[in-house]
């Protein structure tokens, strides 16, 4: 995942808004599950966050990549 840039963790109701915004900017978006290591210390039992939230990654979309080559 070296070309993917980690942005932040987000959950409902903003998750789809974030995806739509980044895609409207021409970026590809990848969502990954939240891992226990992504949570603050002492919050390893926060199962709701791990189930609902996603880590957002972006990278330049095909149109942006064409301009850099």
Image: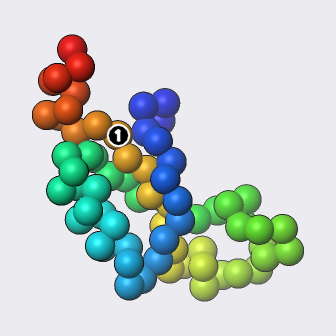
Which residue lies most toward the top here?
Answer: 69
Up-down relation of residue 45 to residue 3 (above or below): below
Q: Give how far across and how far down residue 23 sits, in percent.
A: 22, 55
- In the rendered image, which quarter is residue 50 located in? bottom right
Q: Quadrant of the C terminus?
A: top left
Up-down relation of residue 46 to residue 36 (above or below): below
Name the residue located 17 percent from the left edge and 23 percent from the top edge. 67
Name the residue located 26 percent from the left edge and 46 percent from the top edge. 27
The local secondary structure at tag 1 comes to strand
Please tell me which residue lies in front, 49 or 13: 13
Up-down relation of residue 48 to residue 53 (above or below): below
Please tell me which residue lies in front, 18 or 36: 18
Name the residue located 18 percent from the left edge and 56 percent from the top edge. 24
Q: Give how far across and how far down residue 63 sits, in percent.
A: 13, 34
Q: Give how far across and how far down residue 56 sits, in percent.
A: 45, 57
Task: Residue under label 1, please give it.
Answer: 59
Q: Is residue 33 visible?
A: no
């Amino acid at each position: 995942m070296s070309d993917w840039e980690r942005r932040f963790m987000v959950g409902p109701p903003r998750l789809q808004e974030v995806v739509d915004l980044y895609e409207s900017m021409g970026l590809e978006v990848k969502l990954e599950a939240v891992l226990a290591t992504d949570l603050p210390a002492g919050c390893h039992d926060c199962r709701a966050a791990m189930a609902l939230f996603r880590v957002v990654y972006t990278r330049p979309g095909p149109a942006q990549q064409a301009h850099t080559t």
